[in-house]
Amino acid sequence: MTTTDSGFSATRRLILQGAATVVLIGAGNMASSLAPAFAAANDKYPEEAFKQKGDADAIKSLYGMTAEPSDKVKLDAPEIAENGAVVPISVSTTLTDVTSISFLVAENPNALAASYRIPPGTLPNVSNRLKMAKTSNVIAIVEAGGKLYSAIKEVKVTVGGCGG
Amino acid sequence: MPSTIRVRATAGADVTEVQALIQHPMDSGFVKDASGAIIPPHFIQVLTFEHDGNAVFVADWGAAVSKDPYVKFSFKGAKKGDDLKISWIDNKGATDTTTAKIQ
């Protein structure tokens, strides 16, 4: 599969990271002047929600309401994650009129991990990989028809991974 | 410099499946380096996928997304040969953009 990075040697990766750092420093000023236009085009990044410590506060900050548990939200996560730095987690739902899907890790320093905006025509089905500091409940939130629905699953972490 | 974004978008009968892998450290700001100094947060905040001028998927990310992040989603309305534009911006204002052909 062409999207995996298994083809990269460790050396090449180091060289690439070095090159990226140099370019980023050089482009820093220019990029920051472009940032406001970029942000406006993408609506608003929910900065405050990502700063909240607990999951309840993060959900409240992001959506301004609370979620009710629903068996129509399917949260796919491992029972045990050997490496907390890379935990594959997916959410899908049979709910209709879905406008966003969010992932929270309750015991992380900041609970909100990722939030995805789902426009009409995009399926309510997202997979990603998250870091988990320790064993924790993972919470999936689906926003559908203006209401919030949730699913929760505990993932046991053997090696903490806020390290990344 | 090569793009940080690698994407595979495959059109089916009705639905186009998109998988993206991005090279980025995604430093959380909670980790110390070998000398005990905190590695400052450095992570992608917004990742956008556009088809035909419309955003089909927007990811808002915090520092808890894994290093070299991966995401998969599907959308309707595209066909083989269409362009899919992918762009990200991180918390330091750095950006990258690429355009992929849907296969």
Image: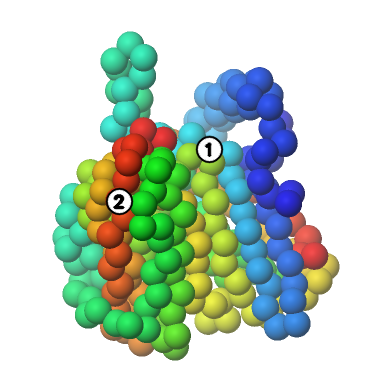
The residue singled out by tag 2 in the image is: A156
Image point (66%, 69%), residue name: B17
Depth order, front residue of A113/B98: A113
The answer to whether A143 is drawn above or below residue A164 in the figure is below
Q: Which chain carries label 2?
A: A
Callouts 1 and 2 in the same chain: no
- Give residue B86's position: percent from left, percent from top: 63, 55
Dot 2 crowding, Cα within 10 Å, few <14, some 14–19, many 20+: some
Image point (33%, 11%), residue name: B35
Q: Distance between the residues labelled 1 and 2?
A: 26 Å
- Which element carries disc 2, helix, strand or loop? strand
Depth order, front residue of A156/B90: A156
The answer to whether A9 is drawn above or below residue A160 in the figure is above
Image point (71%, 63%), residue name: B9
The residue singled out by tag 1 in the image is: B24
**Quadrant location of the C terminus of chain A in the rendered image:** top left
- Give residue A31's position: percent from left, percent from top: 52, 38
Q: Can residue B44 be seen in this view?
A: yes
Determine which quarter of the picture holds residue B20: bottom right
Marks 1 and 2: CB-CB under 8 Å?
Answer: no
- Give residue A19's position: percent from left, percent from top: 63, 23
User: Label 2 is placed on what type of residue?
Assistant: Lys
**Number of numbered markers:** 2
The answer to whether A147 is drawn above or below residue B102 in the figure is below
Q: Mark 1 lies on which chain?
A: B
